[in-house]
Image (cartoon, grey):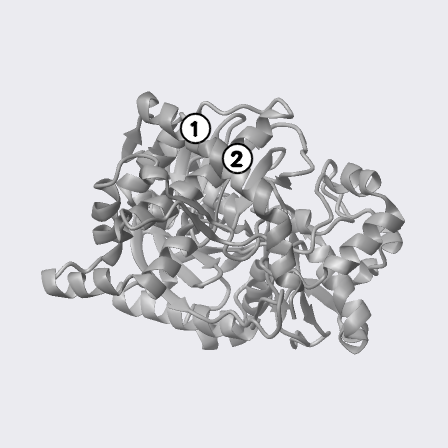
Amino acid sequence: MSKLLLGIDIGTSGCKVAVFDLDGKVVAQSTKSYPVYYPAPGYAEQDPYMWWDAVCEAIKEAIQTGRVDAKCIAGIGVDGQSWSAIPVDKNGEILHRTPIWMDSRSSDICTEVTEKVGFEKIFQISGNSFEPTYSTPKILWFKKNKPDVYRNTFKFLQSNSYIIYRLTGIMSQDISQGYGLHCFNMKTGKWEEQFCDELGIEREKLPEIYECHEVVGEVTDKASEETGLPKGIPVVAGGLDACCGTLGAGVFQKGQTQEQGGQAGGMSICLDEAIAHPKLILSFHVIPNLWLLQGGTVGGGGSIKWFKEQLGAYEENLAKETGKANVFQIMDEEASSISPGSDGVIFLPYMAGERSPIWDKHAKGVFFGLGYDKTRKHMIRSVLEGCAYALHHNLQTAEEVGVTVDELISMGGAANSRVWTQIKADVTGKKIKVPTSDTATTLGSAILAGVGIGEYKSFDEAVKRTVSITRTHEPDMQNNGIYKKYYEIYLELYDKLKDTMAKVDGIK
């Protein structure tokens, strides 16, 4: 029987499960959704119990619909969204819903800690700024505002490590997710115990660190009953979704760069040393001895999804009338009919504040340049362009520390859009290659499992065997010249509006 690998992705809007053969071909897959809760301004929470339920449903569905012999699954890898802070007790019971990466409730705590400890010391150890979206301030928020939860917490887990716990019964912390905790040394890949104390977090509440391809444990009897998987399948530590997607896109060597377009957007530049920028994000790659200098933006697939849900009734109806199953395809066609620059309509994609490089929880989504001569098509294209400007902003910021990029490898659902991918190439002035985009993240998780159990001798072998480029987008430099002018206005708009954006949040 041919061996198979299972990849599990814990995203923001839902989980994806995919079964691959050793050549990276998708044998079966399934997706299940779950909600985000917004109980108060600045709060964004999810229920990890729902993640597990969705994973169980998706695995069963994938096995059934794909007619997969589950006994052929040789290894499991799990990736997940960043910056969770899941408080679990000794029995693994969740004590509170986890704040997710969009959550900014701990802003005041960030200010207090930065003033007390000092930005330079925090940045020197962690390689990252002390922002409310990270895990550290969320843990401190529990300590300050939910002392019973903090006191009874045995370990704080990340999204993928919680699923791995449910599969194996072992609590772990993979090295790529360590960047969310500022007592994690970004150069050594270890906890700084003295700095844990200085920040106010008990080291004992943080799990032991594993390499991402390291086998943590095996599927237990209970997990077997709940998922339909055979008992005893090895499960590796997995990693951050952006890192696994980077691997699944074929980025595994210094200088290669991944561009992502899932719910959120961003980029990951592969480095062989820990080069940090205070306005960007630095993490370990899921591959040993490599790092990723990342830009993480709110503007991504979520922006165009919001437009479809709130303003896209026309496209929804047109899809039904024409029999086209994909509304986004219609939106692509509409966007392609508008000139580069959207005739002056500019979209700021700050739909839940913004992460890098501006780090502004008050930032707001904005349509600028509307007029009676503008149409829905202009707005659609401007959303695609606004997200591309956000990507370009991060790439330019990386250049400030001497990290330059020649080409991008694209992944995520947005990479299915030829129009959007070409816009990104034109805005950045860089070539963009597209592998099998929909499965890059789960493929990366599966590759980790394959390397961890020895089915691949190396990451080099795994990538060459599983990843192939399907198309290439060369930048149109004439369009790039147009976009340079609008990009400057994009930056200027935020600069002039940022104080006003903050005032809006100050109105009760």
Residue 390 in the image: x percent, y percent?
49, 40
Q: Quadrant of residue 303?
A: bottom left
- Describe residue 305's horizontal placement relative to residue 90 as left or right: left
Q: Determine the residue positioned at 55% across, 43% down.
A: 494
* Residue 347 visible, this angle: yes
Q: Nearer the viewer, mark 2 or mark 1?
A: 1
Q: Which mark is residue 50?
A: none
Question: SS at mark 2?
Answer: helix
Q: What is the CA distance from the residue labelled 2 to the residue labelled 1?
A: 14 Å
Q: Is residue 400 above or below residue 82?
A: above
- Earlier residue among tags 2 and 1: 2
Q: Quadrant of the C terminus?
A: bottom right
Q: Which mark is residue 393?
A: 2
Q: Determine the residue positioned at 21% across, 41% down.
A: 337
Kind of residue at disc 1: Lys
User: Dot 1, how many residues are within 10 Å of its Cα: few (below 14), some (14-19), or many (20+)?
Assistant: few
Q: Which residue is mark 1?
A: 485
Residue 184 in the image: x percent, y percent?
75, 47
Residue 495 in the image: x percent, y percent?
59, 41
Q: Quadrant of the N terminus?
A: bottom left
Q: Is residue 479 above or below residue 53?
A: above
Q: Is residue 92 above or below residue 380?
A: below
* CB-based contact (under 8 Å), mark 2 and mark 1: no
Q: Quadrant of residue 272?
A: top right
Kind of residue at disc 2: His
Most extreme residue toward the left is: 322
User: Dot 2, how many residues are within 10 Å of its Cα: few (below 14), some (14-19), or many (20+)?
Assistant: many
Residue 483 in the image: x percent, y percent?
39, 30
